Structure formats: C-alpha cells, structure tokens
Image: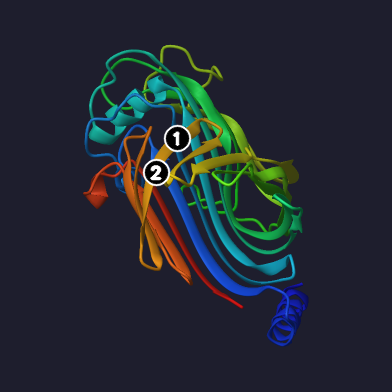
Amino acid sequence: MKLCMSAAALMLLSIAFDASADAEVFTSLRVEGSSEPVPIHQMINGWEDNAYRGDYAYADGVVRAGVAYDGWSVGVERRYHYLFKFSPDTVAWYEEVEQGADNSTRKDIDLDVQMFDARGVFAAWRYRADNWSVQPSFTIYRLGHYQWGDLTGKSSEGEGTNASAYLDYYFDEDKILKYEAEEGDRFGYSLSVSGDWQIDENWFMSATIDDLWNRLDFLSASHRTGCINVGEVESSVCQQDGVSGKDQLEDYTTSFHPTLRFAASYSPYQVAADFVWHGPFHNLTLWKDWQIGRYKAGVSASSLRQLGFRVSGDWFSLSYAADDLRIKHVRDTKLEANLFLRW
C-alpha cells in the first residue's frame, strides 16, 4: 500500500511539472490541545498544582505531506489522538491520590479513555463551481499504540487510596501487570468533507467535518475486564477483595467523535471568526488581520481565553494561540503551520 501511494504521488508530481493546470506540493501541521483540570504539561507528567473542576482533556495532532493537481490531492499522514472524559469527582479523587492526601469524601469514579496514534495515506478531490467548492477526503490508517476503555466505581473516605472500580479496557501495551500477547493487525478509516462559499465580494464562509465517518478495527486486541479493589472500601463494586478479572484477545471495532470546523470572514474590515467542536471540546475564535505588503498578519482572542497571532505569505502560513505565555502553564493551545509550492 505504501509503495502504491508513493508511486501515485510521484506520478502526479511529474505530471504537475509538465501540465498547465494548478499544481501544488504541500506539508502541514495542526495541533490542538485542551486540558481542563491541570495544565497540559502536568496532564502528561504528573499533577502538581490544585486542579480545576473539569470533565475532559483533549489533543489531536496531524502532520501531512502531499501533492495536488487539477483538484486531486494525495499524500501521507501521521496522527496522534487523545480524549479523556471524566467526572469532577474523578478529578478530585485523582488529585488526592497524586498529592498523597487522605480521601476527604466518598466519590463517584468515572473515566473514559480514547487514545491512538497512526500512520496513513489519503486522497481527496475538490469539485469547484462558480462561487463554491466541496471536497471529500478519505484516509486509510495503520494504527500504532492505542488505549480504549472506561473505569467506573467509587472511592471511600480514609487514609491512603481507597477505591473500588470496574475496568473494561483495550490496549496494546501493559506497563503495570506486564501482560503480553501476540495481537493482530489494526486499521482505521476516515471520511472527511469540507466546503467553502464566496457569498458575495465581501463575505466568505467555509466548513469542514473531519472524521464525519470513521471506523477503527482492532484484530485480536488485548482486552482486560474485571474489578479492582484498592485499600479499604465500604462497598466493593465486585463484592470481593483483591484484583479479579480476565485478559483475552478479541476483535474490536469502534469509532470516535467527528470534528466540526466553521469559519467566516468579512474582507472590508479584514475580520474573521472560526469555531471548532469535538465532543466536549469547543472553541470560538475572533480574528483581526492587516495586509502588510505581500504578507498578511493578524491577532486573535478565543472563548478559551487564548490570545494568538497568525502570519501568511505566498508560500507559507503560521498561527499560534495559547491561554498562557508560560509553556508549562498552558491549558489550551493551537498551532498550525503550512508550507506550499504552487505553480
């Protein structure tokens, strides 16, 4: 598959050099991250400060490289996707565990994890009319590491970690119990659709639904189910002590939330707005741009308290936004960078 896509990319590239139609070589990077309880740095490396009451942590990073010719685009992709959903009680309980504090009250534990990384190949085609266009895009992934499942239970008051929970979990690596098994292949599929509309000489709108349809297939995936009791609990969800569960290999198919992106701009004042929505994550951003010679530069503010900037030229575009200038304190951030050669 990789060889076929590489050959197709080289063929399109050679045609583009000889043809008069629009052609482009491009590479792009887009990273979005949001962590409600603690800064992103602490979400990765361990909680240090007092946590806010939040219910999710989200990150999606995509790197692409490809060629485009006469409406067609093909290329390769590297992707990382993370979504943690949890109850405020889970945040408070985990904060006490991380800081070694006594459990102050009984709490309901509810954690849902969706994580994967992947390498993929994509193909897209853009249909253009007089003042609008639409582009479907299809990506095939070879999945790498993954964690997918949920943990539900209760904690009890007292000294130390006291909790009882039920685990339903698919994974490719077990770093705690050292469970190892020979897994099968795993693939992903994603269909995205984008479109734009030049309403009149002043107004322009665009919309994208990434992963509108998607599917992840795990063949002979490692699957763990069971009850976990830690410390002393008033009532166990499985009514027994210790750890009881089952590890087995089984086929598993699932999907994840699509992402909606909407943008509108008004050219006389060079102002714009864009909106992003993925499951529990949503962010509205307002932009003001200025034309500076051959370049365009702008600043932004968002509903997630981000301040940002962007700059673009004939062969590149770059934008960055964050809610804090100190990297280790950032909770919400977005980075986009594009390089392209057109003729």
**Tag 2: residue type?**
Trp
The relative height of residue 204 versus residue 338 in the rendered view (above or below) is: above
Residue 122 place in picture, x, y as percent: 70, 63
- Residue depth check, mark 1 versus mark 2: number of the one nearer the observer: 2
The relative height of residue 197 versus residue 152 in the rendered view (above or below) is: below
Viewer-proximal residue among 173 and 261: 261
Q: Quadrant of the N terminus?
A: bottom right
Left or right of 12, for residue 77:
left
Rendered image: mark on residue 260: none
Residue at x 28% of width, y 26% of height: 160
Indicate the secondary structure of the residue bearing disc 2. strand
Residue 3 place in picture, x, y as percent: 74, 79
Residue 136 place in picture, x, y as percent: 74, 52
Viewer-proximal residue among 267 and 146: 267
Left or right of 7, for residue 310:
left
Left or right of 65, for residue 61:
left
Viewer-proximal residue among 153 and 341: 341
Q: Quadrant of the C terminus?
A: bottom right
Left or right of 268, for residue 167:
right
**Tag 1: residue type?**
Leu
Residue that numbered label 2 is attached to: 287
Residue 223 place in picture, x, y as percent: 65, 43
- Tag count: 2
Residue at x 74% of width, y 74% of height: 5
The relative height of residue 196 versus residue 19 in the rendered view (above or below) is: above
Viewer-proximal residue among 201 and 70: 201
Residue that numbered label 1 is attached to: 284
* Gap in angstroms between the C-alphas marked 1 and 2: 10 Å
The answer to whether marks 1 and 2 mark residues whose Cβ atoms lie closer than 8 Å is: no
Residue at x 38% of width, y 32% of height: 303
Indicate the secondary structure of the residue bearing disc 1. strand
Quarter of the rendering containing residue 250: top right
